[in-house]
Amino acid sequence: MSIYKTLKITIRDYKPEDHPQVAKLSATSFRKDWNKLVKLPDNDMALFLIDVGEVMPYPFKGYLVAENEGEIVGVMILKWAKQKVPKTKFKLSKVVPYGLYTTVKLIAMRYLFPENPKKGVCHVAELAVIPGAQRKGIGTKLIAYGREMAQKQGLAKYALHVDAENEPALKLYEKMGFRLVKKKKHILARWLLGIKEWYFMSQDIDAVTTH
């Protein structure tokens, strides 16, 4: 159930001081996925994600947050070729204490989600909305804002990957103009996250329409 009756959403660039809130948002929004790595309460999970370097701490163009009266309720990360993104180190020493199984799966997850978008493509690398504020139009606002940013960068396509069984996300993306380009299956995705099939969706930035 939503705890947000009214929302005054502002989309803005991420700031370093947002890091704890973004980590907590990731911990709660992707709880099901992170629990397949290590089972921790939300607050401890947020600290784990910070410790191992899974939540980007540095700002860069394309790292966006949705804010409601001082609270971060959504986040989106866009990636494109030749984008200037600060490098972060994978903190293996921080992962090892959580066990060999968690360490191996986290390393495998980084292999599964490489960040190397093709030239001319703006890829939605991450999109998340805090559970209590979902289905309030925040994802729609973020996607629309990201498309405008991609257009200003002179990029021709807007693309993303989504779990084929995530019906709410599929409906949102189709509404926002994305169309299925390719179906993908990956043994690592099934082992890591239980995802049987990925959909790669894309749209031509100049041709998109919503309905």
Image (tube, helix red, strand yellow):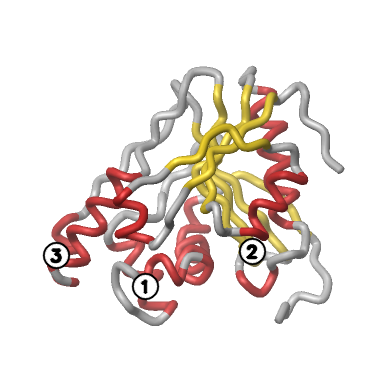
Q: Quadrant of the N terminus?
A: bottom right
Q: Can you give x and y, in whole percent of width and height, for residue 76 in the image? A: 57, 48
Lower position in the chain sequence, tag 1 or tag 3: 1
Q: Residue at x 52, y 48 (%)?
A: 126
The secondary structure type at the circle numbered 3 is helix
Q: Is residue 129 above or below residue 154?
A: below
- Between the C-alphas of marks 1 and 3, the distance is 16 Å
- On the image, numbered disc 1 is attached to which residue? 35
Asked if labels 3 and 2 touch by Cβ distance under 8 angstroms, the answer is no
Q: Quadrant of the C terminus?
A: top right
Total residue callouts: 3
Nearest to viewer (mark 1 / mark 2): 1
Nearest to viewer (mark 2 / mark 3): 3
- On the image, numbered disc 3 is attached to which residue? 96
Looking at the rendered structure, the kind of residue marked 1 is Asn
- Between the C-alphas of marks 1 and 2, the distance is 21 Å
Left or right of 146 on screen, residue 32: left
Left or right of 136 on screen, residue 160: left
Looking at the rendered structure, the kind of residue marked 2 is Val
Residue placed most toward the observer, 175 or 100: 175
The secondary structure type at the circle numbered 2 is strand
Left or right of 29 on screen, residue 209: right
Q: Residue at x 46, y 50 (%)?
A: 197
Q: Can you give x and y, in whole percent of width and height, for residue 170 in the image? A: 65, 51
Lower position in the chain sequence, tag 1 or tag 2: 1
Q: Is residue 159 above or below residue 186?
A: above
Residue placed most toward the observer, 171 or 146: 171
- On the image, numbered disc 2 is attached to which residue? 73
Looking at the rendered structure, the kind of residue marked 3 is Val
- Between the C-alphas of marks 2 and 3, the distance is 31 Å
Q: Can you give x and y, in whole percent of width and height, for residue 43 in the image? A: 42, 78
